[in-house]
Amino acid sequence: MHEFRHFDTTEALARAAADYLAGRIRTHLDRQALCRVALPGGTTPARCLALLAEVSLPWERVHWYLGDERCYPAGHAGRNDVMLEQQLWSRIDAPAGNRHPMAAELGPEQAALLYTTELEAAGPLEIVVLGMGEDGHTASLFPGNAALVDTRPAVPVHAAPKPPPERVSLGLVTLRAAAERVVLVAGQDKHDALQRVQAGEQLPVAMAGPSLWFIDAAAAGE
């Protein structure tokens, strides 16, 4: 079942989520050698990750994956890996090899094929951090899109309803196989989709599996 935690402000949400992720990473590392974490793009996750970067952890034992990527050229400001580099990766002491970006500049099909190989070598992820769009999409899995029923670990995305239309995403099979999922939701524009999820509607973010949700007051309609 989903668990929902409410916070008065987006800043409080980001801090609570950063603290939670740090604790869960420590817990996984107490049990095993590595912790594999998938990260989203977006402004709310960006602040959370900047706060996470301030925590003292054995970062060399954490490997980072992407929930999705936009098919822009490498280094494009609209790519998720550019934000992750700015907010997290450049701020922690960890080998560059711990970062696992998606080669979205090669196009959806080739990028998904390469990332599927990488995910199969890694095994199930410990933590997947997700966002949610106004339509209930998560990663780049949009309602009604063919990628939603693709059973490969990483999936090509065509005809996305928001730009750019071509993307690559973790598939539902990968999201569901993770040990845990954390969803960060902020802003009044997410309120309707959140209500639909809470009412039991199977929007893509709900289809990802039982999750712990961090929600600010605006998204909750408070």
Image (cartoon, helix red, strand yellow):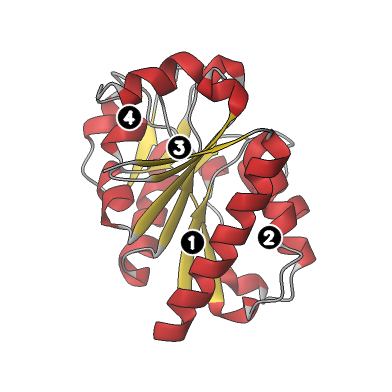
Report whether residue 154 is seen: yes
Q: How far apart are marks 4 and 1 (CA)?
A: 20 Å
**Disc 4 secondary structure class:** helix
Q: What residue type is labelled 3?
A: Ala
Please say if the residues under marks 2 and 1 sit with CB atoms less than 8 Å apart.
Answer: no
**Residue type for callout 2:** Leu
Q: Which residue type carries mark 1?
A: Val
Q: How far apart are marks 2 and 3 (CA)?
A: 20 Å
Q: What amino acid type should be assigned to the residue bearing mark 4? A: Pro
Mark 2 against mark 4, which lies toward the viewer?
A: 2
- Sort mark 2 into few (<14), some (14-19) or many (20+) by Cα contacts within 10 Å: many
User: SS at mark 1?
Assistant: strand
Which label belongs to residue 204? 4
Q: Which of marks 4 and 1 is nearer the N terminus?
A: 1
Contact between labelled residues 4 and 2, with CB atoms less than 8 Å apart: no
The residue carrying pointer 1 sits among few (fewer than 14), some (14 to 19) or many (20 or more) residues within 10 Å by Cα, namely: many
Q: Which residue is drawn at 27% across and 35% down?
A: 207
Q: Is residue 142 left or right of residue 153?
A: right
Viewer-proximal residue, 195 or 181?
195
Q: Earlier in the sequence, mark 2 or mark 3?
A: 2
Q: Are marks 1 and 3 in contact (CB under 8 Å)?
A: no
| Mark found first going from the N terminus, 1 or 3 | 1
In the foreground, 205 or 21: 21
Camera sees residue 159? no
Q: Residue at x 48, y 80 (%)?
A: 29
Reading the image, the residue beneath label 1 is: 37
Mark 1–mark 3 distance (CA, rounded to whole Å): 14 Å
Please report whichever mark, 2 or 1, sits nearer to the chain's N-terminal start. 1
Mark 4 and mark 3: Cα distance apart in space: 9 Å
Q: Which mark is residue 52?
A: 2
Q: Which quarter of the figure is the C terminus placed in?
A: top right
